[in-house]
Amino acid sequence: MSNILVYTLENKIYINLTNRCTNDCIFCLRKDKDDVCGQKLWLDSEDFGAEDVIEQFNKILQSFAHGGYKNEVVFCGYGEPLLKLDILKTVAKYIKDNYPQTKIRINTNGHANYVYKRNIAPELKGLIDEISVSLNGSTSAEYDELSQPKFENAYDEVKNFIKCCVESGIHTVASVVDGYKGRRLDILACAKIAKNLGADLRVREWIVNGY
């Protein structure tokens, strides 16, 4: 299997668990390219286990033997990482148990509770340090236009997931992508929504290559 499950960007380690997603965002990087810094993130197969991820993680970690590693791991790739929840939890626990100084973040679209039909946020407490949830708009209509979710009322699900993460005691950030092909969001409205949910707001300026 030639899957790239673990890759690096800006001296951080990223984990690419799946190519499946419940959104089809119009600004998604994978619409225009299949790699990040030459690391191809389209998977040959989704049939792998946590042990495969951990093996690649340790190999990548060894490449930082002479320094440069920022002690940060991000679950983020060409798909929604929480669609592989069990693998994610196992890998996160391994990292926390063996490299407790490492900060772990998840970048997610916030649909996990809808997918699993339960509140999964408490299951992440203690395994991750931060969760970044894609708010991507100040209204449901704007969210649907930009994120192209594959089910109805997705914006409400995202906001509810943010609230659940906050209530679980996880440092939670609501993120938005601003400036897609010149389009500007109402950042003040997004900030108010995030604040009301108890989360911080991160504004990511859209750039063509995604990073």
Image: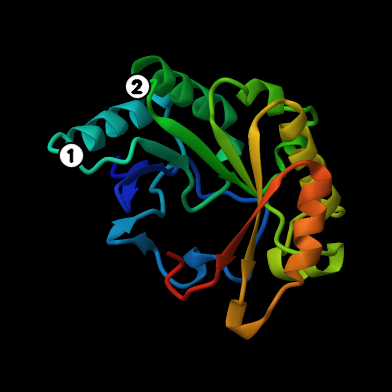
Name the quadrant of the C terminus: bottom left
Q: Is residue 11 above or below residue 202?
A: above
Could you say which quadrant of the image residue 95 lies in? top left
Instruction: Report the amino acid beneath label 2.
Output: Tyr
Q: Which residue is mark 2?
A: 99
Instruction: Report the amino acid beneath label 1.
Output: Gly
Q: Label 2: state its secondary structure.
A: loop
Counting labels gives 2
Pinpoint residue 192: horizontal percent, then vertical percent: 81, 56
Q: Which residue is mark 1?
A: 67
Q: Is residue 94 above or below residue 60?
A: above
Specify the farthest residue to the top.
97
Q: Label 1: state its secondary structure.
A: loop
Would you call the spot at circle 2 few (<14 residues within 10 Å), some (14-19), or many (20 or more)? few
Left or right placement of residue 161 versus residue 9 in this view? right
Left or right placement of residue 3 versus residue 203 in this view? left
